[in-house]
Amino acid sequence: MKNIHRSASNRVFAGVIGGLAEHFDWNVGVARILFVVLAITPAFPGIIAYLILWMIMGNPE
């Protein structure tokens, strides 16, 4: 199983969503749209989750 890391090629800010999409073989555009939809809902603190993932995910290879 490959490690989750931030994407070097599919990045907008830090490559977190691109890295998750590459790891799980998702479409990057759909993953970004899903994250934005979840981030604007009050039950999902998206910005905090993004920052935490940015800190714990490995650097792009």
Image (tube, rainbow, N blue to C red):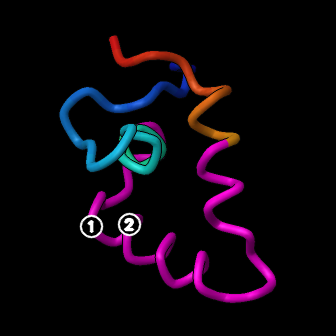
Pointer 1 residue: 29
Q: Is residue 26 above or below residue 46?
A: above
User: Magenta stretch?
Assistant: 23-51
Crowdedness near tag 2: few (<14), some (14–19) or many (≥20) residues, C-alpha within 10 Å: some
In the image, is 37 to the left or to the right of 11? right
- The residues bearing labels 1 and 2 have C-alpha atoms spaced at a distance of 5 Å
> Residue 28 or 13: which is nearer the viewer?
13
Q: Residue 31 sits in which quadrant?
A: bottom left
Crowdedness near tag 1: few (<14), some (14–19) or many (≥20) residues, C-alpha within 10 Å: few
Query: Which SS class for mark 2?
Result: helix
Query: In the image, what residue type sits under mark 2?
Result: Arg
Q: Residue at the right extreme? A: 43
Residue 1 position within the rendered picture, expressed as x and y whole percent measured from the top left: 57, 20
Instruction: Name the residue: 39% across, 38% down.
Output: 14
Residue 5 position within the rendered picture, expressed as x and y whole percent measured from the top left: 48, 25
Residue 44 position within the rendered picture, expressed as x and y whole percent measured from the top left: 74, 75
Q: Is residue 50 magenta?
A: yes
Residue 12 position within the rendered picture, expressed as x and y whole percent measured from the top left: 27, 49
Instruction: Name the residue: 45% across, 37% down.
Output: 23
Instruction: Name the residue: 64% across, 66% down.
Output: 46
Total count of labels: 2
Q: Is residue 55 above or below residue 33?
A: above
In the image, is 39 to the left or to the right of 43? left
Query: Which SS class for mark 1?
Result: helix
The reply to whether the C-beta atoms of the residues labelled 1 and 2 are less than 8 Å apart is yes
Pointer 2 residue: 32
Query: In the image, what residue type sits under mark 1?
Result: Gly
Q: Residue 29 sits in which quadrant?
A: bottom left
